[in-house]
Amino acid sequence: MSITRTLPLAAESDTLALGQSLARVLAQGGTLYLEGDLGAGKTTLARGLIKALGHTGAVKSPTYTIVEPYELACGPVFHFDLYRLADPEELELMGIRDYFAPGAICIVEWPERGADLIPAPDLRLTLEKAGLGRQAHLTACTPAGQQMLRKIAP
């Protein structure tokens, strides 16, 4: 049974703060799917998460490279953006399964474009515009994801 929590995000700072909360629960590894329309705040959330894990440089969207790797103190972090993926089979050619190793943190924007070639997430986060702000719908998809979601401050 999945657990879902909805959180209001009134400003960009709230989105970054949610990224920080996710960093705390994903620090030991896990897979996070980021879903939502263009401009919903997926990359902003990923930036907050990656910076909270200790990255000090710029966090850029991997829209054209498909994946941006980070080697951090907590272990490897891979930020995927599958928006421009022409064919899910491209993921096979890049060795997609190797990225989802135990202990790795995988953040996947536009996961539906990866079809069945990417593992199911521990957490699925859907961002949607709500008035002048956003709403985040967090769903735990695995037992590990359920434990993570329980630790995220409301």
Image: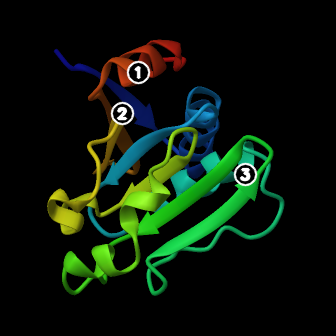
Disc 3 marks which amino acid? Lys
Residue for badge 2 = 122
Name the residue rendered at 58%, 39% in the picture.
103
Residue for badge 1 = 144
Most foreground residue, 92 or 26: 92
Name the residue rendered at 51%, 76% in the picture.
62
Query: Which type of secondary structure does the marked residue at label 1 adopt?
Result: helix
Name the residue rendered at 29%, 64% in the picture.
110
Dot 1 crowding, Cα within 10 Å, few <14, some 14–19, many 20+ = some
CA gap, disc 1 and disc 2: 6 Å
Q: Quadrant of residue 28?
A: top right
Mark 3 or mark 2, which has the lower sequence index? Answer: 3
Residue for badge 3 = 51
Q: Quadrant of the N terminus?
A: top left
Query: Which type of secondary structure does the marked residue at label 2 adopt?
Result: loop
Colour setup of the view: rainbow
Q: How many marks?
A: 3
Callout 1–callout 2 Cβ contact below 8 Å = yes
- Compared with 86, 16 (above or below) is above
Callout 3–callout 2 Cβ contact below 8 Å = no
Disc 1 marks which amino acid? Ala
Is 101 on the left or on the right of 73, as rendered?
A: left
Dot 2 crowding, Cα within 10 Å, few <14, some 14–19, many 20+ = many
**Where residue 20 sits in the image (x, y, percent)?**
64, 37
**Where residue 30 sits in the image (x, y, percent)?**
48, 37
Disc 2 marks which amino acid? Asp
